[in-house]
Amino acid sequence: MNLPAAWVAELATVALATSRLSGMVVTAPFPGNHVPSQVKIGLVLVLAWVAMGTMPSSHLDLSLDLRLVGLAAGELALGLIVGITFRITFSCAEMMGASFSQSLGLTQGHVFDPMLESDDGVPGRIATMLAMLLVFSLGAHRIALAYLLQSFHALPVGQALSVTQATPLLVDYAGAAIAAGVRLGLPVAGVALAVQITLALIARASPSLQIFSVGRALSIIAGLLAILASMDDVVAGMAVELGQLGPRLEHVFEAVRQR
């Protein structure tokens, strides 16, 4: 059965738009791996319906052939880059949580992290949940979705893309996220180090005290107090890092646009 050319072009456009949206939904921390696949598919379909209603009409001669497969791969890669950029920006909290776990000596107890599909320390899991609350309160998920939907205007479907040009930017963003996570965890690490040095000096001066029998509890208490004391700065620092999502996405879209 031969479909009209207009229907074929419309179906091809829907397939390309769905490919771009799927890449972002799969890799971004929102909605996350803990969300059922049916919900993700529904979200992609809803976003595709919204995108089809707002995107400009394509002047490309799209058809259901092998050329469409190559174009869909490029659209999927663009969506993956958007989701990875969101993931990298969010990862500063995961790095900070790992730093807390190491500083407090709580690396033995682990909980399963459905986002990364790996085991994570309890402080790291708490930091990740705090970051997700910040994502919702700051509207970072809305920013990511808005930029993705607006990308259909700046980068219409079927347009040639240089997705490899975004690689240096992703590397820079990953380095900045790691540095931000370590920087936010430094106060707790400093307090833990000072406690350990103090305990070592006391044990050296008076070996009969057996200070290290209570040293672990003292380290945990001091670390928790340091976290509570620096909570305002930690939240502010994570908010600043999450606020970089919009400019980073702009730079990514500018990089992948072929001139």
Image: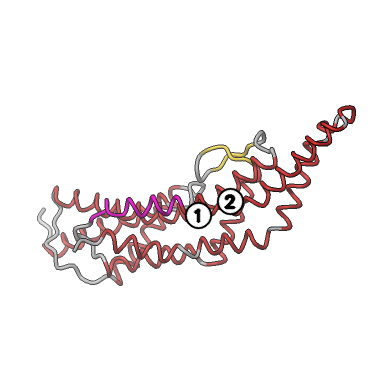
Q: Which residue is mark 2?
A: 128
Identify whether 61 is placed above or below 33: below
User: Residue 48 or 102: which is nearer the viewer?
Assistant: 102
Identify whether 162 is placed above or below 214: below
Q: What secondary structure predominates along the stretch shown in magenta?
A: helix
Label 2 with label 1: CB-CB less than 8 Å: no
Horizontal side of 134 relative to 41 (left or right) equals: right
Secondary structure at badge 1 equals helix
Q: Where, quadrant-wise, is the C terminus in this rendering?
A: bottom left
Q: Which residue is mark 1?
A: 90
Outermost residue, right side: 208
Query: How dense is the environment of label 2, judged by Cα within 10 Å: few (below 14), some, or many (20 and up)?
Result: many
Check residue 32 for magenta coloring: no
Residue 9: mark in rendering:
none
Highlighted range, magenta: 162-175
The spot of residue 74 in percent (x, y) is 24, 52
Which residue shows up at 81% across the image and 32% down it? 212
Q: Earlier in the sequence, mark 2 or mark 1?
A: 1
Horizontal side of 223 relative to 117 (left or right) equals: right
Q: Quadrant of residue 133?
A: bottom right
Name the amino acid, label 2: Thr
